[in-house]
Image: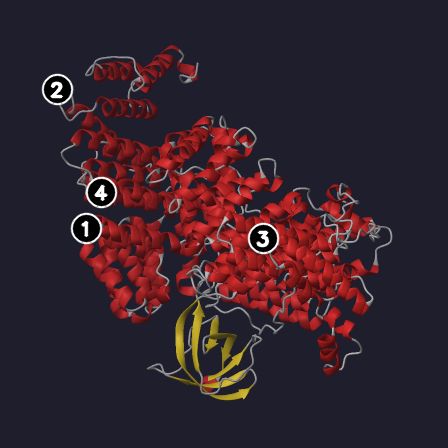
Amino acid sequence: ERLIGMIAENLQLASPGELLVEHLDGIILHLYMISPEAKSISALSEAASFFHRLTGLDMYECARDRKSEMNRQVVEQIILRHVSTADGESMWREGRAVLHRALQLFSTHAGQDEVLKDFFPQFLNVQTKRNFRVSERSEAQPGQIVVLKVLKFIIPELRRHLDEFFPMILSTIRCAQQIVGLQRHACEVWHTLITTAGPKSLQLRTSLTQVVVTLLFLAEKHPEEVQHSLRLLLIEWKDELQKEITNIPYVKPLEVVPVLADVYSALQQEQHGVLAIDKLLQRHVHGISNDDEVVQMYALMELKGNLQLHRSVVVEIFADHIRHATAVALMRGIISVLLTRCSQGRYDLRIAACDCLGLIGAVDPSRIGLIQRERESMEDLSEDKIAVEMIVKHLVKIVRSGADTGPTKASLAKRTLNTVERAQLAIQMLLQFLNCVDVADESPLKKGRSHSTQHNLSQHPTREARPKQPVFDERGRNNWAMIPEDVQPIVRPFLRTSFTFNEDQSAVTYPIYRRDVPFINWVKQFARDLVQKAEGTMGRVLQTVRPLLRLDTSLAQYVLRHALLHVVCLGNDDKSKQIRDELLLVLEDARVLEDLVDEGVVHEVLEPTQFQLASSMPNGLEMQGHTDLVIQIEGVRRGVVSFAEGGRVTIASAFPAKIQIKHQKYTICQVSPMKEVEDQRDGSGIKSVTQLVFSLVDDLSRWHERAHQNLKQEKQAPAAMTGKIQNVHKFLEHIPKRVLAETSERCAAYDRALLYLETHVREEWMKRWKGAQEKIALPPPLGERCDEKTVSLFQRIYVGLEDSDGLKGIAKLRARSSLEEQILDSQISGDWTAALACYEQALQQEPGAVRYHLGLLRCLRNLGHLQTMLTHADGGIARYPREAHNFRKYGLEAAWRLGRWDMVKEYLGAAQQNNDFNGKVPFDNHLSQILISVKELDQVQFKKHVRKARMSLFEPLAASSMESYQRAYPSLVKLQILAELEGIMPHFFRDEADTGSRDEWLQNTLDFWEQRLSLTQPSLMGREPLLAVRRTLFQMLGMEPEVAASWVAFSKAARLAAQTGTAQSAIMQAERFGAVKAHLERAKLQLSMQVNQHDALRALREYIDSHDRNDTRTKPEIYRKTLVMYWKQIQFFGSLPTGEVVAGFLKDLAVFERKVDKESEQTFFTLGHFYDTMAFPDSGGSA
């Protein structure tokens, strides 16, 4: 006592008691750590008397009053000391006894588990942050092992509150198991968590798929440690968890460990138990839709295996899509989720999703139905609803999965905790905003608490329970009710936690968009800036999740829509202009594609929008004959330009970046109406960014239209809503519909382009009509309202839509047709010969126009003039070095189709040496590499380039699938090509000694390919790549009959598409390879063209006369088809009387034995038709 008095005096304290009160936490901790237990209890009693004598206070009362601080420090130290030194069961029991005594100290009317509940979230957050988030190393650290031991120690003490902390514990364990040295400890914690939770745990049931898949992942290295946990979940608790077990994906391991044989057997039985295809598809939808990425991977692997195993069933579903309507609807859901998986997430997940899409194939959209990616709509929701939606749809998913969707260089463990911690913080702050801080006290869990809990230690004074005085309000209760019941236990722990985070509030620099900025980065940066611009209550809600926007793309896109609507509705002109300029920058960048006209250095800045240029071109600055010119300075687009004498340039429409450009490099390019946006050349995210801008503008327009209609229905419109509508209208008014139309056409969004162009024409006429002195009732004809450029844009849009009626209408509007318009007309009609002639004439007028050279190469490819195409590409590479990458692209297509592998290697080597496409190698280049590896039987290179080819489709798939399945269809064709290459590759390595099974397997594969081809969209350009790759593979295998059959199939597709030139070229190729059906296809083409029809009949007659039953080359089914076709045409033209037609038909038919089977059905049907015509000549055989 004297010593304490001296210390207090030296510290200038009022009394010794003040010193004891200040250091009470250390005193309590020291007394509780005394062992054995009896000695500790005695010491606590003596200390309580001593404390009362010096302070006049009750030591336990004082400790309870300091609960917020004492709870964390004392309990944390007790746990850490006992856990870090415990090496046996007796030590664990002693530690738990000490913990119980400490908890009793802080227990009042609440039970011990309630005290632990208040303590646990903060404790777990601090420990994981200290030991995992700071560590960049992948090896296990002592502090990390202690954290897992603490979890194992404390999980049994959480009792009935375990469900509330289940997601937090789950994310910590999964974070730890990413570190190899911690996996064994993680297995022990998993077992403790599972046994404590039990089969009736709501959270265990909800997360069962995630838990089992994670344990299966750990079983690859630690089967002994996880066997008991898996056996509990899948065998012993099978009856209680039957419904959840059914949805667990099963992937057969490469090697089954004996100790887990019964576990894998149980899973396999569950999979085999799902026999109905509808139930199997539902299982796949559930698996690939899971929030956890590990579950997604296992589900995708299972889906891939079943697509390969049941490939004939999948073909049957789409072949008879009307009868299998339910299965088609489920397949539609699977495809929709797979398209989502291809556009975001880890690379291995995206590749697996692409793999599954390739196995499904490029199915004709008419067989599938409408598939649209699910996206958040832009609605004028209240702040409370937005907060609840963010919690339920996004933040809880992050906490549940413990995953980080943002790529970063930090370790996986650090990333996981970083994301989960920020999500927990956001949930806590949003619950506070929703006034849900005390609402949890009304829950049944808290209503069932005992209010008479007393301390077990006799030395502790008893104390009456303090009455609760919770503060509830109606808003808080209503908001809590909007949170689903299965989500409430997850967010309940955050009602009392106090996480903190210091977020960087640095401003975002405009313009955000650049061609080299990935789509994900642009979305996150743009969303963060809009959140920072938000004001009022909505700004407070959105800024809560701002720390997470860097880490979660889906949340960023959700916030982006609501933040954009909010900021635009505010009506701040400066903010709206900054946002509008950013959107217009993206649209202009996608709209303007060009050929280089001039380059050099800016010599002098004359005015803010006028410069003097110093050209570096050999002939100086020559702009004669050029239109639609655009200038870029140091890679930044400045705008459309006009020219004066002496190289003086004036920007017609400036861009928002500042003009500080003297002595900087410039390029001047011409907009090319003949090109399309190419991701490989134009940056890593231009299509996706442009598509998202389209979506944002569409959503704003729909919101404005809906709000305007609602306003009309109200008798007294609120002033605030009227102001919002006016602000949104003003914002949209400054985004030109013409720019939207041109950009949509560039990005192949032809439906949207037509909508915006028609709107633009209508609005322009309304402006002139309002300003006119004489009002007319009806608008003038379209031709009087459209200039030549508008008509040309209409034509290009209708070409993209393949709308022949629209093209005929547009043709009526043109006073004269330019060469480019004639080219488009020829292309849409399939007259590639006429298009080739137009390109030749265009090149005579402009020999240096690269776009015409590339168009000519497309014509040569579609006509089948591959050798000419290869020669022209070689010339273009030599003549135009700057555009060599484009010519090499077409040269590669011709070379591998011709089997010129030396040229393929030469082009690929040059592309790599010259860094074509800035490192973003296009799909066609990867396809050429794949074919070379097949030719050289190099499996390692084959797998490498197939993977790269799939990765090259990520960006096109992500952008096109935002809108519809139809837009993504070209990419799906490429994925089907890769799947077929992988499917045929094993044939090249089969044992030649086993010829019988080898031929049978190959024939089954070819039959399956034919079935898949019939399911694709019946368009020439859609099927040509598939048929070309198949022909190349057949040539490698020396299968000339299959090569010939492929040419016949291509000729048929070209004939049905009315592309006669292409069809003729394909028939010649089929005849070169000895196709048995070539004469039939040539006759059909000549008859459809209505030219040389007599030559077609003569060729059919020659085939009939030259074949008989003794000719081994004669195939009865081909002979019968020829016979039917010949005599039907003879009857149609009236060349012979009907009686002679019947006699001749019977005579030719007698060559082969008559038998009734499926192949001869058409033959006898035709004979019956002839007899019908003889009996009823007036009806033409229709009786």
N-term-proximal mark, 3 vs 1: 3
**Residue kind at label 3, given as amino acid type:** Gly
**Residue kind at label 4, given as amino acid type:** Gln
Q: Residue furthest top?
A: 1175
In contact (CB < 8 Å): disc 1 and disc 2: no
Q: Quadrant of the C terminus?
A: top left
Q: Secondary structure at mark 3?
A: helix
Position of 301 compared to 994: left or right?
right
Coloring scheme of the render? secondary structure
Vertical position of residue 384 compared to residue 1023: above or below: below
Q: Secondary structure at mark 4?
A: helix
On residue 936, the disc is: 1
Q: Which residue does the image show at 33% across and 63% down from the upper left?
A: 886
Q: Secondary structure at mark 2?
A: loop
* Relative image position of residue 906 (x, y in whole percent): 21, 61
- Depth check: 1089 or 25 in front? 25
Q: Which residue is mark 4?
A: 1069
C-alpha span from label 3 to label 2: 97 Å
Q: Which residue does the image show at 38% across and 13% down from the upper left?
A: 1172
Q: Which residue does the image show at 52% across and 61% down from the upper left?
A: 689
* Relative image position of residue 296 (x, y in whole percent): 47, 45
**Given this view, does label 3 or label 1 mark the residue nearer the observer?**
3
C-alpha span from label 3 to label 1: 67 Å
N-term-proximal mark, 1 vs 4: 1
**Given this view, does label 1 or label 2 mark the residue nearer the observer?**
1
Q: Which residue is mark 3?
A: 95
Q: Quadrant of the N terminus?
A: bottom right
**Residue kind at label 1, given as amino acid type:** Glu
N-term-proximal mark, 1 vs 2: 1
On residue 639, the disc is: none
Q: Which residue is mark 2?
A: 1110
